[in-house]
Structure formats: structure tokens, C-alpha cells
Image: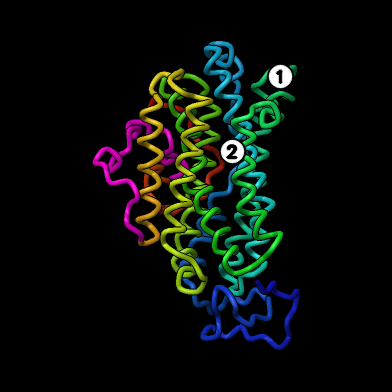
Amino acid sequence: MPVNPIFNPDGSDDVENRSIWFGKTTNLMQLNDVRYHWAVSLYQQMRENFWVPQKLDVTQDVVDYWNLTKAERHAYEGILSYLTFLDSLQTCNIPHIKSSITAPEVSLCMAEQISQEGMHNQSYQYIIETVIPSEKRSAVYDFWRTDKVLFRRCEYIASLYQRYIDYPTPERYFVSLVADFLLEGLYFYNGFIMFYSLASRMLMPGSADIIKMINRDELSHVRLFQKLIPEAMEIYPHSVDQIYEMFDAAVHHECEWTNHIVGNNILGITEASTHAYTKYLANMRLRSIGLEPLYKDEKYKKSPYAHLERFSDTKKEAHTKANFFEAGVTSYVMSSGVSGWEDI
């Protein structure tokens, strides 16, 4: 796979010559005339979604932590460790994907994504350092080392990226793109549901506030890869069966991990609802890139957690809306803060 030079004076930034990959760009950010207008709109949305985790109050969570059951605390800590891994991985991997992007407007979206992934990790750290007792924090950060199921989860996800890095062929680049889409569109959401489930019972509202802001960011990343993958399917060698196999494997691993860390131990979440929700999400993501759903049963056509959707809605003073169960992201407007939990 070609990697863009730092500067290519023989390149062209004319809009008619632009392409997402294999273009001959100067590598300058010339954005006065662009080919992919969706990328400019998405970048503006991502920028307008700026927020700072330290401005969100988690004081109540410090008290609520001790009101959680042992199983709830275990899930809370394990999911924080898993989410930290996911965003850490993206911070490292997206630059490898970005280095072959030749449309500056698309490259700009990826640059903003990298920034947001880093800020998400800062957000998880803020929760851990504020809410988790000091003597337990190291165990949370190292949860992936001590929990064999989580370690297998991390190894599997990272291996799909590492194969491309070790041997950067077009075929492996496409696999890495699909793996990115699976991470952004599938892997976060059972963890988010756990936070929303607690918040629906008046527990850990500050953590859920932070998660819903991360949730909104992640939907913009989903939107980016929804645009990239159909374009990539026109260019890169692949098979639809390969995409379905990756989705099915992702669903299997995600259900295994969620049922291991949450299982039937948190009110409102069951192993059956985890399976139904994960397959529902997979079907929705497949449709968004122009493919037929993988799971045909009627029970996978609706989300079992639709009643929790309101906890991802940051409309309020921010005048924004990110529908947790939709593929797209609506317009964002910057806000100096995020409202509390008046609706709970």
C-alpha cells in the first residue's frame, strides 16, 4: 500500500483528480474546493462536538460506587478497562490507515478522530482516578492482564490491525478498514448500555454523562467508516463472504466478553438481551454499508434497549442530538457544559 510523502510537489490538488486512495496529492490541506463534501460536513460536526471530561461532575458517582453490588462494581471496572483498550488501539491504528488517504478532506476527519480517541482515554482515566478507590486503580488499568477473556478479546482485535502493519497489502488494508468499522460500530455499545442501565436506576450519573459524550463522538466515527467502506469495496480486493465472516466473529467475541463481564448480574441486562442487541447492531451496520442483514430472525430487527435511548440524548443546553440507535449523526452545536439528569 502506498504511503503519502510528506510533500509531493508533482502532485495535484484539483478536485477532479482527487480520490480517497491512490490519488496523487501534494499532501497540502487545500479545502477551498473539495470532492467529498460529506467529509467537510462531518469534520465540522466533529469539531463542534468539543467537550472536556473534567467539566462533568462525577461527585455523586464516588458515593454511588459503594452502593453498587459486587457484580456491578466488577462490571463497571472491567468495562472501563475494555473501553480504554479500544480507544488506545484506535489512537495507535488510525494513523496507519490515514497515511494512505489521498483526499485531504477525508484525512482531516481522521486527524480529528485521532484527537477524539485520545481525549476519550483521558475521560476514562478521569473516571478511574476520581471514582475508583486508589488501591484498586492499578488493577483496573491492568484488568486485561489478569482477565483471560478480556486478554483474548484484546488480542483478537489487535491482530486484525497488526496483520496489515506487518505486511501492508491492499487486501489487508481492506480488512483493517472493516475491523475499524466493527470497533467503532459494534464493540463499544454493550459497555455503554451498562452505564445507561445504571443511570436509569439513579446510579453513577456522572459516568453516564461522560459516556454519552463519548457515544456521540463514536457515532461520528461510525459515519466516517460508513462512507469509506462502500468506496473501498469498489477498489480493494475482497469478498462479501469475508465481510460477513468478520461480522459474525465480532458478534461472537463481543457476546462472549459481555456475558463474561456482565452476564445476568445487572438489572435490565441478560445474556439473551446481549445476544439480541449485538446481532441487531451488526445487522444495522451491515445495512448502512449496503449489505443484507446477517441475522434473519425477527427478534434482531429491534433493539431490546430502546428504553435506554434517552440516556444518550444530550439535547438539553447543548442543543444536540446523537441517536444511540441510529447510524448517522445530526448537527452539533458547542456548549460550555452538559446538563444534568433532570429526566431521570
Give coordinates of residue 212: x percent, y percent.
49, 37
**Along the horizontal axis of the image, is 194 left or right of 343?**
right
Which of the marked residues, 1 or 2, is nearer the chain's N terminus? 1
Per the image, label 1 sits on a secondary structure element best described as helix
Secondary structure under badge 2? Answer: helix
Residue under the point 50% across and 74% down: 235
What amino acid type is highlighted by mark number 2? Arg
Please report the bounds of the magenta region as a residue range: 291-320
**Which residue in the rendered view is the most extreme toward the bottom?**
10
The residue lying at 67 percent from left, 85 percent from top is 11
The quadrant in which residue 210 appears is: top right
Name the disc covering residue 153, or none: 2
- Type of secondary structure dominating the magenta stretch: loop
The image quadrant of residue 12 is bottom right
The answer to whether 328 appears left or right of 104 in the picture is left
Badge 1 local density, few (<14 within 10 Å), some, or many (20+)?
A: few
Q: In this view, does 40 lie above or below 121?
A: below
Q: Does the magenta stretch include residue 308?
A: yes
The spot of residue 276 in percent (x, y) is 35, 35
Q: What residue type is labelled 1?
A: Lys
Q: What residue sits right under mark 1 in the picture?
A: 136
